[in-house]
Image (cartoon, grey):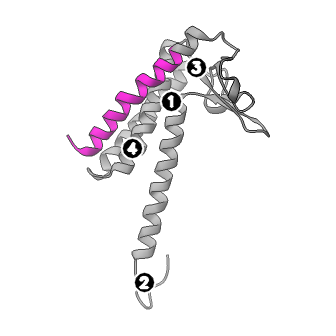
Amino acid sequence: MTPKLRTLLALIAVIVPIDQLTKSLVVSSIERGSYWAPIASLEGFFRITHARNPGAALGLAQGVPVFVFVALTLVALVMIGSFFRRIEPHDRLSAVSLGLIVAGALGNLTDRVFRGGEVVDFLQFNLGLFIFPDFNVADAAISIGVALLLLDVVTHETEAGVTRKSVPGEKES
């Protein structure tokens, strides 16, 4: 088994269960639409809530049938799998990035399939100017994975641009 595959599988094995466990705890402990009061010291900045999102990220695409989200997730997973196959066996940063994205997608896909088409969101931050939309562990994994992937792409492009020597008389493309 290649290091990149071990990395991907390890992230899935850790993140999906944590995501589902935290969502189950929220569903069983916090009434829908309310929040957990014991975190008084963070009141005004952070709350653990119980929200449901039948739409896409940030509550967009409300009312779209659940099969559309399931189909889009499956298409995205196939595309990520295709990209994953092309990365080098020892490219850990890309493997971590894609592993986080896949684990997050699987966590939210599990919700869509087993929680009536809705995703459980429970982490809420009040940033002063606005309250950031509620999210969950899977959403955080996807966001971190995308940020790492962008960092990886920018880093590789920068390295390629710095190390490439121009040939006299060659036109820039």
Q: Indicate the amino acid at tag 3.
A: Val
- Of callouts 1 and 3, the N-terminal one: 3
Q: CA distance from mark 1 to mark 4?
A: 14 Å
Q: Which residues are magenta?
A: 1-24
Q: Which residue is mark 3?
A: 120
The residue lying furthest to the bottom in this view is 168
Classify 152 as above or below 168.
above
Point out residue 102 in the picture as x, y percentages from the top left corner. Answer: 42, 34
Q: Residue at x 50, y 18 (%)?
A: 111
Q: Which residue is mark 4?
A: 96
Q: Where on the picture, by quarter, is residue 163?
A: bottom left
Residue 19 seen from this side:
yes
The residue tagged with tag 1: helix, strand or loop? helix
Place residue 51 in its image quadrant.
top right
Q: Is residue 128 left or right of residue 66?
A: right
Q: Nearer the viewer, residue 108 or 11?
A: 11
Q: CA distance from mark 2 to mark 1?
A: 44 Å
